[in-house]
Amino acid sequence: MRKLQLIALLLFCWTLGFSQQEFGLEMTKELCSEKYHGRGYVNDGHKKAADFVQQKFDEYGLNPVGDVYQQSFFFDVNTFPENVELSIGGNKLAVGADFIIDANSGSYSGELTPVYINSDKDFFNFEYGKESRDGKVLIIKDINTKDIDTNQMLRDWKYQGAQLAPVIFLTDDKYTWTVGRMEFNYPIIELRDSLFADEIEQGASIKVNIENQFIKGLESQNVIAKVEGKNKKRTIVFSAHYDHLGRLGKDAYFPGANDNASGVAMLLYLAKYYSENEPKCNIVFMAFGGEEVGLLGSKHYVSNPLFPLEDIKFLINLDIMGTGDEGITVVNGAVFTKQFKKLTKLNTKGDYLKKIKMRGKAANSDHYFFTEAGVPSIFIYTMGGVSYYHDIYDKAETLPLNEFDDLAKLLLEFVKKI
């Protein structure tokens, strides 16, 4: 009988763990689907993602903090809803794979003649020369150096050059993207040096058709909900940003599976769990917008809190939850050492994760402004596994969530002890 009970218990634990990971995979797949347009600022992708999170909070029976779930804030943003096209030698290149553009790029359409910039003198002559700049593209080659001054010079050429003419920056670095908050006069195009430099030098035609749309005062939103606990005077906060980079023209979008559909999946799992299991204290769930634009959603919240910040006993920010082969890193672990030691002790006892790495203070996710305002906060991200980041390859189907179960269990144990 005892043996049968043990088998039944093991089967129950296995089923519970399986459902956690399956839940995470389901939520990640949903948020990465093209109907959310990369959760950015084309086709209201960010708004659709926020509405999905709100729908789940409501479905789980959570209550809004305040009158409504969503808290609005506003910012300027540069977007690319239509054409982002480049042809070299008559061959149309794939945006995001063969080339990428700077997120602050302006518009340009037409065929271009290259002008090579290899020195400050070249740039000066182009900037102040008498010949027309119409129909010219500045060609700047990455020198691949760690020298700070040289790299600053290249950045100056790119950004100042984009006020004068289109720029092609030849580099073999990984293509990564971000969200632009300003608008250059012309586009900056990053292009593979090893694949296209010789072709351009030999006179291949360069045709560009890039259209940006700069939006002033775009309204975005945070989504905030709570589960009331037995002790209503204490509050633990879980946070995760739901936004990502959005679309880059009609042909490409950035799914943002690891960053940060995975964190939202964990946030929603915890919301569902606590809605079914009354916590000892209040648990508030904050899904922030505007993180990829500069932590704007969390910054706005800290400046406009819906309940006193001093009521928050601890905040746990979840960003990049999709792997965990090599464990997790805890930003602010070196600041809040008591809580970090408690977390590592629980991990050792439960044999959950391979390693917990300590980091110091960093302004790299939504915990930051809470910490600056005096709220004890940590930011947890997973290590190991796939390394896709801010590119078109960060897809749900490549993300294993292999430590989702163990990390969820660790977080639940941690909340009991803090």
Image (cartoon, grey):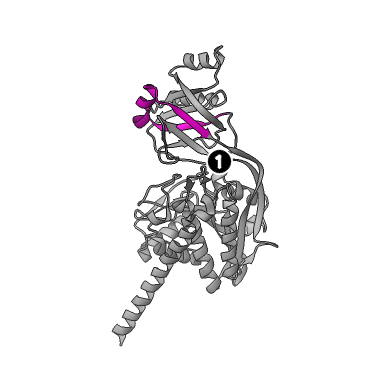
Residue 91 drawn at (x, y percent)? 40, 34
Horizontal side of residue 62 vs 8, given as left or right: right
Q: Residue at x 52, y 49 (%)?
A: 244
**Vertical comparison of 130 with 209: above or below:** above
Extreme residue in the front direction: 90
Q: Is residue 343 visible?
A: yes
The count of marks equals 1
Q: Amino acid at mark 1?
A: Phe
Residue 262 drawn at (x, y percent)? 46, 56
Residue 284 drawn at (x, y percent)? 59, 62
Q: In front here: 170 or 310?
A: 170
**Vertical comparison of 208 with 58: above or below:** above
Residue 207 within the segment the image draws in magenta: yes
Q: Residue at x 46, y 25 (%)?
A: 154
Q: Residue at x 57, y 25 (%)?
A: 163
**Vertical comparison of 27 with 204: above or below:** below
Residue 57 within the segment the image draws in magenta: no
Q: Is residue 346 visible?
A: no
Q: Which residue is mark 1?
A: 80
The answer to which quarter of the image holds residue 228 is: bottom right
Q: Secondary structure at mark 1?
A: loop
Extreme residue in the right direction: 67
Start and end of the magenta stretch?
186-209
Residue 372 drawn at (x, y percent)? 59, 46
**Vertical comparison of 200 with 377: above or below:** above
- Bin the neighbour count of mark 1 within 10 Å (Cα to Cα): few under 14, some 14-19, many 20 and up: many
Q: In front here: 104 or 151?
A: 104
